[in-house]
Every structure is written in C-alpha cells, then in structure tokens.
Image (spheres, grey):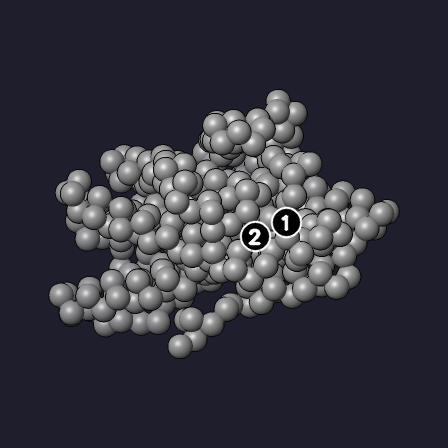
Amino acid sequence: MRRFLPDGFTLSLIATVLLASFLPCRGVTAQAFNVLTDIAIALLFFLHGAKLSREAVVAGMTNWRLHLTVLASTFVLFPVLGLLLKPVLSPLVSPDLYLGILFLCTLPSTVQSSIAFTSIARGNVPAAIVSASASSLLGIFVTPLLVGLMIAGSGQGALSWHSVGAIVLQLFVPFVAGQVAQRWIGGWVRKHATLLTFVDRGSILLVVYTAFSAAVLQGLWHQLPLPVLGGLVLVNAVLLALALLATRYGARALGFDTDDEITIVFCGSKKSLASGVPMAKVLFAGHPLGLIVLPIMLFHQIQLMTCAVLARRYALRHANTRGVPVSAGSGEYR
C-alpha cells in the first residue's frame, strides 16, 4: 500500500501549492523569487551537464532501434495523441489546462525514475540510462520546437524567438558549460548526488511557488472547480494508459525481447516534471503558468503510482520464469 501513497517530494509540492494559495508572493518579493528561480534553473542544467557520463552514452548507443522507439514514443506518439484526442478530452478541462496537456505531451522522458523502474522490473538498465539521458538532452531542443508547432496549430498563439533564445541562454548554455566542466567536476558532482537532488527539487518548488502565487492572485481557484480538476485527472490517466499500451504492444510487434520491452515501456511512457516546470517558466511567459504546470504535476504522481505497480508485476513475472528472487528495489522515484 505504501507504493500508492504520495512520496516526500509530492507532499512538498502539495505544501508549496497550499503556501502559494494562502501566502502568495507579490511585488518586490515576487521579483526576487523570479530572479532566484532563474539562477536555480541555470544551476540545475549546469549540474546535469556535469553529471551526464559520456562513457555511458557511448556504451549504450549500439541498441539504436530501442532508442529510436523510445524517442518516437516520447516526441511523436504523445504529441499526436494530444492533438487527436483534443476534440474528445478538451471539453473536460479549460483551454489553459489543455494547453498544459499539449505542453506535457512535448516533454522529454524522466531520467531517475525511468532507470529505477527498469531496474526493479529486471529490464535493460544500460539501455534505459542511454535512452532517458538522450531524451532529456534532446528535449532542450525538441520540446520548444514542438511547443511552437502545437500551440500554433491549436490557435493559442505561437512560440516567439525570444522564448527560443531564453531556452538557449537559460537551459542549453549552462548544460554545455557543465559538459565542458565535467572533466574537472564531473566526479565530484556524481559523488555528491544529493546536491543535484536538492537543486533539482528546489528549482521545481521555486517555480511552482511563483507560478501558483501569480495564478492565485489572478483568481486560479475560482477558475478551477472540482469537476474541472477531476476532468484533468481523467485526461492524464487516459494519456498515460494509451502510452503504456502503445509502448508495450508496439515493442512486442517490433520483435524486442522482454528486457528491452521493459525499457521501452518505462522510458517511453514517462514525462519529466524536472524538465517540464523550468521549461514552462521560460516558454510561457505571459501565460497563466499555474494552470500550465498543474497537468504536469498531476501526471507526475499518476505515472509514479502506476509504474510502481507495473514494475512489480514485471519483476514477479521475471521471478516466475527465471527463478530470480524479487526484491523491493531501490532508487528514488522522480
């Protein structure tokens, strides 16, 4: 039953939303928080660049069919589902919330939780490391382009060159700087993984607090009745279910073995909260950011609970067929 309960980070997100609801930042305080958030996001991508191992990427690049399948699910299947299902699902939520759903569909896969669930399920962990890392890196380029195409196609404005430039300066430049500095600080960053976790989670909480503060001051909770919130949960659940089914049976149709199927399922069906929230702040300046990041926050928890159960079922099947004992697994789900 513990797998169905929110983890510590999810509870922190809920507490942050409550804090923003009752004590929203405004005026000079809001400006200071925005500057602090920008610094935290830049530091986050710098540390990710310093941590990403080139050796692990080179070692896992040989399974190119698997990686292309994961990337196709992440950056093709999800956006297509978001657009095709819009006539059916958009009546359940508000236009701004469905804009958040479309943005969710463009995001890269998670890294830590994809690898952790693949490991628990006894899948191809080295391939998961490469696929999830490649997805996260490509997301810096692909997500803004997909957002521009999908928003323009939905009639809700277009992605400006200013936003593209902001992505390059705030996300890509620090990432490249981290890759350059990896020679000197890469080992230290990997050794002090808690620092990256602190910056990772801290930047998300800062963005969520500032975004929801602004949204609350604009009357967020008056615009979000319970039926709409329930509709948003349903939309997220439908997207995740379709992605899980497509990756599972698609992997089998393409002839992948069970280990690779597990990797494709857990890397190709997930969306990154850690990348999504900072990107949303940069890409959607002037939009109601609270409503845009809310779908990502809900999808994050739904995917963790669902994939925890699915990983355990894969592990049990592995134990029954190969006689391998099942352990609770390790790793932090994010």
> Which of 73 and 54 lies nearest the eye of the viewer?
73
* Image coords of residue 95 (percent x, y): 55, 42
Q: Secondary structure at mark 1?
A: helix
Relative to residue 248, is residue 298 drawn left or right?
A: right
The N terminus, quarter of image: bottom left
Relative to residue 67, is residue 330 drawn left or right?
A: right
Q: Secondary structure at mark 2?
A: helix
- For disc 2, the neighbor class at 10 Å (few under 14, some 14 to 19, many from 20) is many
**Residue on which disc 2 sits:** 294
Relative to residue 2, is residue 244 drawn left or right?
A: left
Residue at 60% of width from left, 55% of height from top?
A: 224
Q: Is residue 198 above or below residue 101?
A: below
Q: Is residue 51 above or below residue 192?
A: above
| Residue type at numbered disc 1 | Gly
* Image coords of residue 125 (percent x, y): 32, 52
| Residue type at numbered disc 2 | Leu
Relative to residue 150, is residue 316 drawn left or right?
A: left
Disc assigned to residue 290: 1
State yes or no: discs 2 and 1 in contact (Cβ < 8 Å).
Answer: yes
Residue at 15% of width from left, 69% of height from top?
A: 320
- State which quadrant residue 302 falls in: bottom left
> Which of 77 and 313 lies nearest the eye of the viewer?
77
Residue 137 in view (yes/no): no
Q: Is residue 166 above or below residue 270?
A: above
Residue at 57% of width from left, 43% of height from top?
A: 96
Residue 314 in view (yes/no): yes
Disc assigned to residue 298: none
* Image coords of residue 3 (percent x, y): 41, 71
- State which quadrant residue 157 falls in: top right
* Image coords of residue 293 (percent x, y): 57, 48
Q: Residue furthest right?
A: 28
Numbered marks: total? 2
